[in-house]
Amino acid sequence: MKRIVRYFYKLFIKVILFSYYSLLSYRDSIKTKRFTNIIQDKEFVGGKVMLLALYEKTALRNDTIELLKEAKRQNVFIIGVNTLKLSNENYPEELIDVYIERDNFGRDFGSYQAGMQYIYRKKVDERCSRLLIINDSVFFSKKGLPEFIKDLFETKTEVLGATENKEISHHLGSFCISVLGRIVSHEKFENYWKNYKLTNVRPLVIKRGEFTLSTILKSLVSSENNFKAIYDVAFFESALARDKELFHNYYYFRREGSRRFWTNTNLIDYFKHDFILKSFYDKYIEGIKLNSEVLKNSRYETKPSEEDQKVDFVNFATFMSTVDFETLPHGKLLKQRLMSIYLDDFTRGSQIHNNCISLHRLGLPIIKLDLLYRTVCNFNDLIKIKEQLDESQQEDFMTLMTNRLSGEKFLFGLNRQAFECGIM
């Protein structure tokens, strides 16, 4: 009975908060002075196009400049739409072909819409071989960036995202989607952007934006295989199979973060509660004790005590790092069990958030900036990612990541309630 009461109480609070923030968004839609200023407008002669939604003031971030430099090296025509303003002396004229500044309403999809309206108005879609829609809600790592951009533009897949999310509705992360030119010029795709209704309410942006955009794109591809992510489950399974260091040390490359998000069970807990994993671990500990000179000279009972059966992290880490699945009796069974756990772990929630450490190691050069704010990651997780970055980017990365600390800890009152309901 208490659970039912608690459920309806939370639902009531969520409805109230959603209504309140919807009213604020409506107020902002009226009060915000609408403008779209085209600061620079170079002619497009055909080829690859990048639509980049920006939220950067005075000067572009260093990591954003790295993205633009690499895109220009690969002959990509760049359309940048910024909801803030760059100073004249900091405007990188040679890196952006079309630069638009607009009012700050509608989040990233507002900038996407403004960019797409420019594309259709200027008939860029008629000569576009492929369009990459991307935004700066991510940190752009130098590592893997050239290959990543090349893969997104040279792929044969009609709609290709960086990562996906199968929670609620299967969709590609809207922070990075590559679309074939034929689809860009399709009337259905154009009408989506023409009719998209702007809002500042996060759940509505996700529903009207990410979910609906993926639905539209799915309907326009020629087959199911032409709507996918680069870093999907199949990729991760293949990476685990060939990368022994990742497989053996997955406990290290796995985020810790908050257990509230996507049932984040510590890997060591599986060894405490999974009877197959526990039996392998107990056998390993038994071998350590039997090989101990101290224990050999003592009257040690072979039956382990309750204290002995506890899973110690150091022994667990040593076991995982050194186990030889080929020579271990029934080692194939252990490897299969671990593989199934790793893949199940990979698919939870937003995959770019949930697997941020391992994916960057495997070549994904974009890292969500809200990892700490959403309490998906803790500081230890950030340090692990930082250590993987090019040394020249490490300081910028930590500064950007810590601009917004955990909402779970540092938001209070109405904002805290809205944060916990996913409204902000």
Image (cartoon, rainbow, N blue to C red):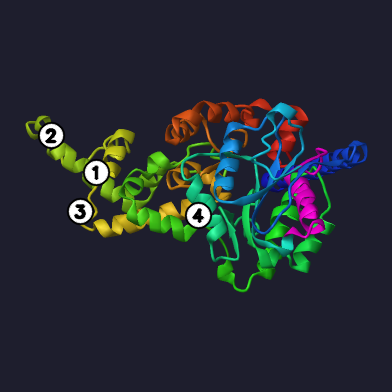
Query: In front: mark 2 or mark 1?
Result: 1
Q: Which residue is mark 3?
A: 328
**Disc 1 on helix, strand or loop?**
helix
**Disc 2 on helix, strand or loop?**
loop
Given the image, on which type of amino acid does mark 2 rest? Ser
- Residue 61 relative to residue 248: left or right: right
Given the image, on which type of amino acid does mark 3 rest? Leu
Q: Earlier in the sequence, mark 2 or mark 4?
A: 4
Q: Which residue is mark 4?
A: 231
Given the image, on which type of amino acid does mark 1 rest? Thr
Q: Residue at x 45, y 47 (%)?
A: 363
Disc number placed over residue 164 in the picture, else none: none
Q: Earlier in the sequence, mark 4 or mark 1?
A: 4
Q: Which residue is mark 1?
A: 322
Position of 333 relative to 392 (above/below) = below
**CB-based contact (under 8 Å), mark 2 and mark 4:** no
Q: Residue at x 74, y 52 (%)?
A: 43
Circle 3: is it few (<14), some (14-19), or many (20+) Cα within 10 Å? few
Q: Earlier in the sequence, mark 2 or mark 1?
A: 2
Q: Position of residue 406 (x, y in %)?
A: 61, 30
Point out the stretch of residues depicted in magenta.
100-124
Given the image, on which type of amino acid does mark 4 rest? Tyr
Q: Earlier in the sequence, mark 1 or mark 3?
A: 1
Q: Which residue is mark 2?
A: 292
Position of 142 relative to 184 (above/below) = above
Q: Is residue 359 visible?
A: yes
145 and 246: which is toward the camera: 145
